[in-house]
Amino acid sequence: MLEKLFGIKAHNTSVRRELVAGFTNFMTISYIIFVQPDFLSAAYMDPGAVMFATCLSSAIATFFMGFLTNYPVVLAPGMGLNAYFAFEICRNNLGLGLGLPWQQGLGIVFIAGLLFFILSFVGIREAIMNALPNSLQNAIAIGIGLFIAFIGLQMSGIIANHSNTLVTLSDLDNKNVLLSIFGIVVMLALLARKVKGAILMGILASTVVGLLLGVTSYKGIIALPPDPRPTLFAFDHHDLFAIVTQLKLIPVIFVFFAIDMFDSIGTLTAIGYRAQLMEAGKLTKARRALITDAASTVGGACLGTSTVTCYIESAAGITEGGRTGLTAISTGFFMLLALFFEPLVRIIGGGYPINPIIAPALIVVGGLMLRNITQIDWEDITESIPAFLTMLMMPLSFSITDGIGFGIISLAFLKLVTGRSKEVHPVIYYFALFFIACYIGGL
């Protein structure tokens, strides 16, 4: 049955390898189970209900991705968009943002999700994805690798904030840093010896050492799932028309739409190259993947969480050998189990922004994603500079979307000034103007 559904042998993998990859994905993204309630509780949302919505929406979305596309891609509430939701849109305990009730904020996410779905269904998002030239597609994959490695370095405590240089090397005698270095060493040693499950083994080894050092602590095993009712279908569905007609909220809806669109396009492109799913520079099931991504946002808003999107951490499972939808489905299964094993999951996934158990996986996976750098034509300045800016700006701006924006603007400019405008799809020029307008408008 599994062979018929997922083509295990055809993808040169095994059921065991897919399950290990799925568990690795779960371990790598498990921090969102605790980060999301923490972020959204700042907007006065019930943290238990948000945790329930996070686990359930992630599981359902990932199941659909696995069955509809057979891709090893995991979905969960997006980092960055959750901060935008809590601190820039909704009324929060820091006194920031527009000051909207969180119910209205979820209504905005719902509307943006419907836009995602419509544009994905008619193939517009797929057309945008396929319009990106190969050099930019590879640069996106590399940039995301640098981005998640940078996140991992921050989560590990290896680098710290600095008032003059922005970041600096932290104290290496700190227990968190030492545990992170231990995890990196274990993972790299096992990868170098081509041991299957190297990243998962590194996470588990770091967990054991973390317990011994007191970096993390035993918090139990089983607990009843939290009550979902405080956020379940609580979005402002009676006033959706009023939300759309409020001029001040139209840019907010568009920002949610634009960020999710380019984040998902960038993530799917990176994962496609990493998992060798690309054919002639295109994902053959891109439309199904993007429809799933869009529908997941709508479902997440109904359950009570911010935008659900494809996760670049899926690369961790791919590195472990995951190649089919069985990887995604097993990750979704573990997300459901997390509702009942919340204390056990907290041992590994808790501790954001510092998490020396998960951080090594992000650093190692990010480094492995740099292999596509040889696919960029560095002799052609109209290709190499946009690729360079894309790779550089993602970690420096802490945004996948901004990296893509700088890449598209510079690509369009260089092709125009060199008289080679016909070498790229016309949609590139439209989106170059779109990004320029966003930056000028401060969006």
Image (spheres, grey):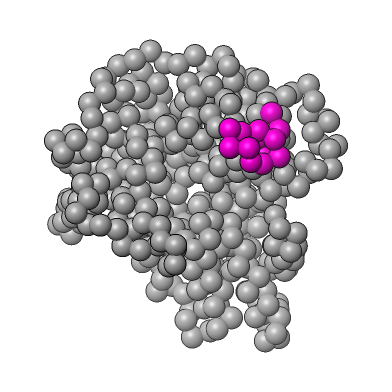
**Dominant SS type (magenta):** loop
**Residue 164 vertical placement versus 229 (above, below):** below
Considering only vertical position in the picture, is 316 above or below 294?
below
Q: Is residue 239 visible?
A: yes
Residue 324 visible: no
Q: Is 442 displayed left or right of 152 in the figure? A: right
Tell me which corner region of the image, top left, top right, bottom left or bottom right, holds residue 381: bottom right
Give the residue drawn at x 58%, y 37%: 94
> Where does residue 364 sit, x and y in percent of width and height?
30, 55
Residue in the foreground of this view, choosing between 277 and 369: 369
Of the pair 306 and 87, the residue shown nearer to us:
87
Q: Where is residue 397? Give x, y as percent.
A: 53, 60
Q: Is residue 86 magenta?
A: no
Question: As drawn, is 394 to the left or to the right of 201?
Answer: right
Q: Is residue 98 magenta?
A: yes
Q: Which residues are magenta?
A: 89-101
Q: In the rendered view, tell whether residue 399 sits above or below residue 215.
A: below
In this picture, residue 142 sits left or right of residue 436: left
Q: Position of residue 160 (x, y in %)?
A: 36, 56
Task: Give the quadrant of the N terminus.
Answer: top left
- Give the quadrant of residue 136: bottom right
Residue at x 19% of width, y 35% of height: 214
For the C terminus, give its image quadrant. Answer: bottom right
Name the residue rendered at 59%, 60% in the picture: 402
